[in-house]
Image (tube, rainbow, N blue to C red):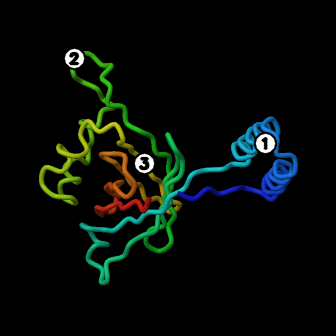
Amino acid sequence: MRVHFSGTLAFTALRAALSATLRKGSADVKLQTLALITAIVCLSGCILSVRGGFSPVQGPLSQQSPIPTYNATLTGVLSGTITVVVADGEVCKGPWHFVSTASSAPSDVNPASPSSSAIAADWDMVFGRGYYVAHVLGNRLYARATLTGNRGTSMDVEVSNENNTRGNTRGIAVDDHGNLYKVSVYN
């Protein structure tokens, strides 16, 4: 993961705080510096960011040769934003959030659970028969997003990391132009 700092003011304050810590060296100063650095990072718009790719596997875009892969950025920790630049430079962007798997609805019905995914069958189309039930359904590290493009494209995205390990985050996306994408997250 990369950490991005916004603005030169945050960088200048961070550099000054680190210099003070190195000069004085006491435990109190180090603790105060850590608190200052944490505050600067939070207030400067610092975000965690990982790269990814959307590769069409079905639909009009999958018929191109070579098959394109569209660059994406996923930001945030417990929620965040997904941005992907698709065909002709259209920028699709939207918030992602974890899907709750705890049932709070009567009986075993939970409209927010992964079992209600409208694109569950697409997981099997991309990753193989039975993948959704075996690797996504009931997973606590399961997120959804609806992206909107600056030229009108709408895209539903789902990503999952079955065992919370680096390099194991994968997903699917479906746009309103009939394209199905394999989503790879390079974390």
- Residue in the foreground of this view, choosing between 20 and 66: 20
Give the Cα separation between the discs numbered 2 and 3. Answer: 28 Å
Viewed as shown, does residue 163 lie left or right of 147?
Answer: left
Q: Which residue is label 2 attached to?
A: 107
Mark 3, Cα crowd under 10 Å, few <14 / some 14-19 / many 20+, is: many
Q: Label for residue 146?
A: 3
The picture places residue 115, in percent across and down from the top left corner, at 24, 36
Mark 3: amino acid: Thr
Q: Residue furthest bottom?
A: 65
Image vertical order of residue 42 relative to residue 3, above or below: above
- Residue in the foreground of this view, choosing between 43 and 65: 43
Viewed as shown, does residue 9 lie left or right of 149?
Answer: right
Q: Which residue is label 1 attached to?
A: 33
Pointer 2 and pointer 3: residues touching (CB < 8 Å)?
no
Seen at 41% across and 39% down, the residue is 98
The picture places residue 148, in percent across and down from the top left corner, at 47, 54
